[in-house]
Amino acid sequence: MANPVLAAAAGRVARRYMAGTKASDALSLIAANTARGHLTSIECAGESVRSEEVANSESKIFLSLISDMKARGEHATVSFDLSHVGSVVSPELGLDNALSMATAAREAGTHLMISAEGSARTDLVFGPVRQNLRRIPGNWHHDSGQAAPFSRRPQPRHAAPRPHSSRQGRVP
């Protein structure tokens, strides 16, 4: 942002929704959320990477985060955009990097979620996934021609069952 006052204000607002700037910040947040019985979704923000080198580097950040989660016994959904890991460079690069991440997530006992991105990229996101469902590790399922990231959500380790309400609207 060109205006420093607006940039500072935007930064304060954004920090409310960010775990931090390092993977260790995210890992601490996962542990704190789990202790409160909450699930966590972590995303390293970014998209529209247009360099193979950068896409591979960004994929390594996700792989490192997944590896660190496994080592600490933490579980969180790892969310990402295919364009962040190379699909804009080539659909094959994005899918190969995503498959590496899916394999690591499966071995770590956690899950991935591919973000939808904008509607202009729907085919870029779902096309390679649909075409390669057999190559994708078991934390994905296929339902009536639609690719979906999970067959089920992980349960928090220390959470009590959440009450359900038969009334419309909010749960008391």
Image: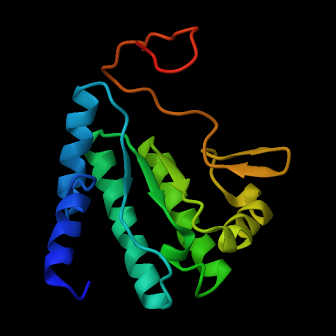
- Residue positioned 56% across, 10% down in the render: 167
Compared to residue 64, the image places residue 30 above or below, namely: above
Tell me the quadrant of the picture where the C terminus can be found. Answer: top left
Left or right of 126: which side holds 88? left
- Residue positioned 41% across, 73% down in the render: 46
Q: Position of residue 149 (x, y in %)?
A: 61, 48
Number of dots carrying numbers:
0
Q: Pick whichever, 21 or 133, lies toward us.
A: 21
Display colour scheme: rainbow
Q: Residue 132: name its quadrant.
A: bottom right
Left or right of 171: which side holds 166? right
- Residue positioned 43% across, 72% down in the render: 59
Left or right of 35: which side holds 74? right
Compared to residue 168, the image places residue 68 above or below, namely: below
Q: Position of residue 128 (x, y in %)?
A: 72, 69
Tell me the quadrant of the picture where the N terminus can be found. Answer: bottom left
Q: Position of residue 71 (x, y in %)?
A: 27, 47
Compared to residue 85, the image places residue 73 above or below, namely: above
Q: Position of residue 161 (x, y in %)?
A: 42, 12
Q: Residue 2: name its quadrant.
A: bottom left
- Residue positioned 30% across, 40% down in the render: 74
Q: Pick whichever, 144 or 66, lies toward us.
A: 144
Q: Residue 94: name its quadrant.
A: bottom right
